[in-house]
Amino acid sequence: MKEQINRVLKYFTKLYFALLLLFSCIEHSYAQFQNHGPQVFAQAVQASHFVKDKAGKEFLFTVVRGMPARLLGYDIQSGVKVLDTALVGTDGSWDMTLTTDNILYIAGNGKIYAFDVADNTLKDLGKVLPNQNVVWDLHPGIDGEIYGGTYPDALVFKYGPNDGFTEVSNGPIYTGEKYTRSLIFNKKDKHIYAGTGSNAKFIKLDPASQEKVSLLIDEEDLEEFVYDLEIVYDVNGDDLIFGFINSNKTIKSFVYSIQKDQIVLKLPAIDIKSIVKAPHTNKVYYTARSRVFELDFEDSNLEPVELVKIKGVGKAGEWVGPGKYRVFTNSKNVYLVDVDQRTAAVKELDVPNSPILIQSIFWGPDDKIWSAGYLAGQHGTFDPYTHEHKEYPGLHQTEGMTAMDGKMYFGIYTKARMYSYDVNKPWEIGKENPKFIGEISGQDRPFALAIRKKNKEVLFGTVPPYGKLGGAITHLNTINDSVEIFQNIIHNQSIVSLLNNEGKIIGGTSISGGLGIYPTEKKGKIFEWDPHLKKVLWTDSISDYWSISGLFRGPNGNVWGFADGTLFEYDIDRREVLYTLKVYEYAKYPSHIWRNGMGVYHPNGLIYFTLADRLYSFDAVAKKLEKIRDNASLILLGKDEKIYFRNGVDLWSYQPLDR
């Protein structure tokens, strides 16, 4: 009898654990994870170069952004694509250069690639230097060597086929700067001339001795970034460096004489990568504002002459014979310009539409999930009921979105541009739908948006430009599109989160400003903004955390959010932290903190949030945290009660269980 009882107990014990396993499997299968695929696509060409092989055959090589980026090659005469290969480990390229031994080097995410034109092979050369995330400009040296600049330590490196990578700048090209954004190597004096950001500097570097000299130190036009540089030799006895200044306030160009050590000409913004000198002349050709220009340095007036209109921004230029200038633009067109006749023949190239990283997501008033793309911009929608996908091209990188009264509102980088789109009318770029409303002066990234429906207002919280501190709150009146901007409302802190909590506007800040500047403040703030009096009513810190972001209304009607990597609950009436849970901890202060966690409160009573590229659930009653999966960021709660998030270029959904 005793043995029978034991057998029965063992049977039910096994059955119990089997059922637990079964229900666990049922939960994971029923709580459907579904990949809805890429949402945003672009034909965004970046680094480009014209190349001849040993037989004299002409090619164009260009990189199209995507995950991964792709190196494309075209036969210039036929326009036929002859190469399409993945640049594994990078999503784009800022520059490529051709060496004296006809090897094409391509910049990537902290690494470079080498393409041998002769045998059509691509090699990943790996990381250029430790802890460098981006390689910007590349320029050929001598004997097959190249030089390049990096972020975030503003270094300069040399690469040679025999010696590999070597740092030649002995630390940052300029102390305190994070970007060596542009550089050229002068083959005559064997020096490097480099431009920095986020506080534009122009530096002369001897790569042999590592001696650095600051140039143009009294030049007021140097703001934010010396973004691009190119050298043109032997122009009326001078070797000239053409530079492009890119800032939140203005864009412009300059021409610097190495021999005279001074700027000899200032110009409107030009496409530096398109610059070509006609042999045996003092004439330079380039593109700017979708036009081709001739600049004759023998002309005492030094006035650029417009030759012909084209489409797009010049990405690469070359001189191809008597009176012939060839240029490739980001419109995917190759133009052959007859500079004497002032005519242009055009050939459009077949550039693939590539999926790009999702930057922000939002459930729109059309009951579709809107996704915005990183860097290349563009938008796409996903209908969760029909699974139909649609592309909406033409706008740049959207940092934040919201909606009110049938309209989408976009906060766009750079210059914190504001757009609206009536979802009941066709999307027609250039025809007021989407409609450009304006820019938020002195600001750059509108991550935080909140609506005041009764008052017909959209509020924007922003991060300032590169090298600046102090964000803003902006009121947009949606009836007449008038704008009021309130700068630096929390001293030297960016406004990275806004929440309308039953009529009260609650905000979160970060001590980070624009990229390339160190914070002056120590603690991020949670605060209340009075939308009537247009002032801050109170502020509070949560311990010593650098940022307060991702604010949302959660259990108990309280405000929840993220203090760096810590989930918190806050009572705004008592101005008191009720609960904290450390989920992720930074090893050290990163380059910036703008967005940490993002959370939603689900009808099943659980909080779902993403943080540090993971999706979690949290039971606020039982105080139970569960990691659901890796590779998840951003979040929204759909009307269908599904949780939507991104994984790289893909939009995913998760169907939680009822409780």
Image (spheres, helix red, strand yellow):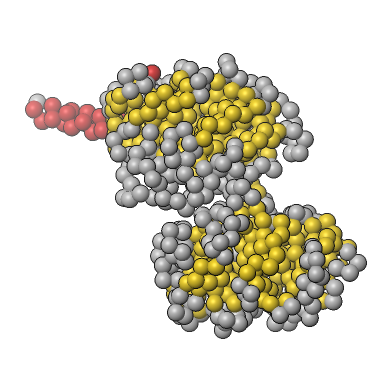
Q: Position of residue 417 (x, y in %)?
A: 62, 39
Q: Residue at x 18, y 32 (%)?
A: 10
* Position of 613 relative to 388 (above/below): below
Query: Image quadrant for the C terminus?
Result: top left
Q: Residue at x 57, y 46 (%)?
A: 374
Which residue in the rendered view is the most extreme toward the front? 218
* Position of 619 relative to 69 (above/below): above
* Position of 545 relative to 216 (above/below): above
Q: Position of residue 166 (x, y in %)?
A: 44, 74
Is any part of residue 321 visible from this angle?
yes
In this rendering, position of residue 154 left or right of residue 248 = left
Query: Image quadrant for the N terminus?
Result: top left
Which residue in the rendered view is the most extreme toward the bottom? 143
Q: Position of residue 460 (x, y in %)?
A: 54, 32
Q: Please identify the quarter of the rendering in which residue 538 is found.
A: top left
Frontmost residue, 339 versus 424 = 339
Q: Position of residue 413 (x, y in %)?
A: 58, 43
Is any part of residue 598 visible from this angle?
no
Q: Residue at x 38, y 18 (%)?
A: 557
Q: Please identify the quarter of the rendering in which residue 580 is found.
A: top left
Q: Please identify the quarter of the rendering in which residue 37 is found.
A: top right
Which residue in the rendered view is the most extreme toward the right? 341
Q: Residue at x 75, y 61 (%)?
A: 287
Frontmost residue, 365 versus 298 = 298
In this rendering, position of residue 245 left or right of residue 581 = right
